[in-house]
Amino acid sequence: MANGIYAKAFEAFLSAGINLVSDDIRVMAVDSASYTPNLTSHQYKSSVPSGAIIATSGALTTKSVTAGVFDADDVTLSSVTGAQFEFLIFFKNTGSDSTAALIYCMDTATGLPATPGGGNITLTWSNGADKIFSLKNS
């Protein structure tokens, strides 16, 4: 699989259901042995088995959208334990897995896959042209 935006997220962007700057956007580290992304049909966090989620961040900060490119401050996952993870999945946090919209699945980034060792893991987003992700290139 390559990095990609969930199809339902595209719909939500176009119907004002997801606002990357003002909504509570988070990222979860996910084990591919327990979850296979389906960018076409998966819509909510409830599609990701809880056992596949190794860690979840707090709300991303200093978010921006410029010329179709999404960026935010780097984020630290604290005291991460569990299985190796291969995916980072961005989602709109609503407080309920059945309404928390999946946005973007990243599996090709520096440091992936990662094996937790009980310490903190800092997720450093690209400083390249596409930052976290780009709508214009997806």
Image: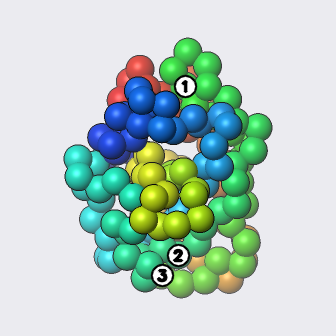
Position of residue 86 measured from the top left corner of the image (x, y, whole percent)? 42, 64
- Label 2, secondary structure: give it: strand
Nearer the N terminus, badge 3 or badge 2? 2
Position of residue 117 measured from the top left corner of the image (x, y, whole percent)? 63, 81
Mark linked to residue 83: 3
Closest to the observer, 21 or 115? 21
Q: Amino acid at mark 3?
A: Ala
Answer above or below: position of 34 versus 100.
below
> In the image, 71: left or right of 78?
left
Q: Which residue is mark 2?
A: 54
- Residue 6, by quadrant, is top left
Q: Amino acid at mark 2?
A: Ile
- Label 3, secondary structure: give it: loop
Position of residue 121 measured from the top left corner of the image (x, y, whole percent)? 68, 66
Closest to the observer, 70 or 43? 43
Residue at image location 39% in from the left, 68% down from the top? 46
Mark linked to residue 69: 1
The quadrant in which the C terminus is found is top left
Answer above or below: position of 109 versus 44.
above
